[in-house]
Image (cartoon, rainbow, N blue to C red):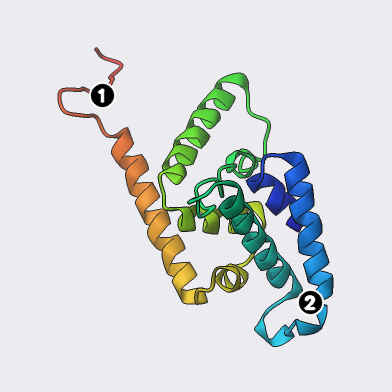
Amino acid sequence: MPVSRYIQIRVHNREEAEDICANVFRNFLLHLDSFDPTRGSVMTWIVTMARNAVIDHYRHTRPGCEGTERLCRNLTDTLDTLADEQPGPLQAIINNEEIERVRRLLDRQPAEIREMFSLRFDQGLRVREIAEVMGLSPDAVKQRFARTFRKLQQELTDEDKPRGGERPCAATD
């Protein structure tokens, strides 16, 4: 179930995650008559409820915490699924290093960006649905994704460049 997975990724205590999930579905049923299909899909509506419940959970359990610092921490599952084929041992090491590089760069992004990536790649939401969940326009979401992808690409390229005084390895050395 996408909603329970969304919560479990963000709340690492299993019992707390189950309680939050139960409350989300209870609220879903209690407020079912207020659902407006013109404002979005049922999935978007319930994921928004789950997102708000997780944020509320962290606000109540950690005074002063807005709940965003621990959101979107688990991108490993998403990144690990990028490779379709079973690589050999050397390729697996290289892939794991690349995945770790991307994860490290994503962890340095603002919480809102990390959440957008999580909603897209962990939860499989479309841009329109992400916009609804986060209270943004679809164009704003597209622009933030594009800007972040360019930034990440540049940061990866910069990491690959030799630093001052370093020489790239050459077979003729």
Look at the numbered disc 2 and give the secondary structure of its residue: loop
Q: What percent of the width, then of the height, locates residue 33?
A: 81, 83
Label 2 CA crowd tier, 10 Å (few <14, some 14–19, many 20+) = few
Say which residue appears at 79% left-offset and 77% top-offset: 31
Of residues 101 and 160, which is closer to you in this image? 101
In this rendering, the label closer to the viewer, 1 or 2: 2
What amino acid is found at the position of numbered circle 1 in the picture?
A: Pro
> In the displayed structure, does residue 65 sit left or right of residue 148?
right
**Looking at the rendering, in which quadrant would you find the C terminus?**
top left
Of residues 126 and 83, which is closer to you in this image? 126
Say which residue appears at 59% left-offset and 26% top-offset: 92
Q: What percent of the width, then of the height, locates residue 57?
A: 64, 53
Picture disc at residue 16: none
Say which residue appears at 53% left-offset and 59% top-offset: 116
Q: Can residue 1 be seen in this view?
A: no
> In the displayed structure, does residue 15 sit left or right of residue 50?
right
Q: Can residue 52 be seen in this view?
A: yes
Q: What percent of the width, then of the height, locates residue 134?
A: 55, 68
Q: What percent of the width, then of the height, locates residue 83?
A: 62, 39
Q: Check the image and report above or below for 87 versus 75.
A: above
Give the quarter of the image for residue 1. Answer: bottom right
**Residue furthest to the left:** 165
Label 1 CA crowd tier, 10 Å (few <14, some 14–19, many 20+) = few
Measured Cα–Cα span from mark 1 to mark 2: 62 Å
For marks 1 and 2, the one nearer the N-term is 2
Look at the numbered disc 1 and give the secondary structure of its residue: loop
> In the displayed structure, does residue 76 sit left or right of residue 29?
left
What amino acid is found at the position of numbered circle 2 in the picture?
A: His
**Residue furthest to the bottom:** 38
Picture disc at residue 31: 2
Q: Check the image and report above or below for 21 versus 76.
A: below
Question: Residue at label 1?
Answer: 168
